Amino acid sequence: MRSIVGLWRWRGNPLCRRSDRREAWLALCAVILTVVITPVLGWLGASQTNSALLQNAKEQKHGRHQVWATAESIQTRAPLDSDPESAAHRPDRTQVVAHWAGPDGSSHKDTVGSKKRVQPGERFRIWTDADGQVVKRPMSAQTASSYAALAGLAVAAGAAGAMETGRRLTLRQLLRRRYAHWDAEWARIGPDWGRTGSNN
């Protein structure tokens, strides 16, 4: 941005070279593309991701069922944490050996996790698929929207990074051409540098 302002201020200056103008136009185009294109790409990425996740959540909601399970025995384990101080503030993980009937009426028995403490013989709700196997609860629309927003931010950040990388690579090429031009000029006038009457 500084080069753009400087070029506009000194646009009539005879010391302003063609390479300086090209560098300023490159910076201006990069800024415009970043400001205009990046939000559009982020919005498109978030929109597409949200549609896909909502469709996935709909399929999960259709294919997963909440059933009642009966606890048989309880296993309490300490939280998985290498730091004893932080582990002391976390609740113990509860593993419950339970049995339940699947949506098709088949009987199942397995060890499942429970967020709340249950006692043997107590009933609690779990999520299963059509075969009666334990699965995670279906994705909610709010969770899908959160993931979509993160995806949109990632797409926007990636687009901005790609544009900045392209700007830097193009600027490097411009600098190489400038240095090559300087080398050619120096090779032409260097041997006569400082000699009086060299142009005669």
Image (spheres, rainbow, N blue to C red):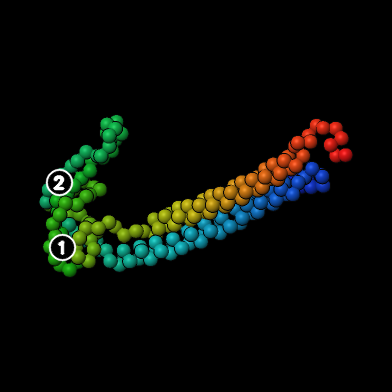
Taking the image as shown, residue 190 lies to the left or right of residue 55, namely right
Query: Dot 2: few (<14), some (14–19), or many (≥20) neighbours within 10 Å?
Result: some
Query: Dot 1: few (<14), some (14–19), or many (≥20) neighbours within 10 Å?
Result: some
At horizontal 87% and vertical 35% (from top left) the residue drawn is 197
The answer to whether any part of residue 24 appears in the image is no
For marks 1 and 2, the one nearer the N-term is: 2
Taking the image as shown, residue 113 lies to the left or right of residue 194, namely left
Percent coordinates x, y for residue 4 in the rendering: 71, 47
At horizontal 66% and vertical 51% (from top left) the residue drawn is 26
Percent coordinates x, y for residue 73 in the rendering: 12, 48
At horizontal 82% and vertical 47% (from top left) the residue drawn is 12
Taking the image as shown, residue 51 lies to the left or right of residue 70, namely right
Q: How far apart are marks 1 and 2 (CA)?
A: 19 Å
What quarter of the picture does the N terminus occupy? top right
Q: Which of 13 and 92 is in front in this view?
A: 13
Q: Which of 166 and 126 is in front in this view?
A: 166
> In terms of secondary structure, where does tag 2 sit?
strand
Disc ID at residue 74? 2
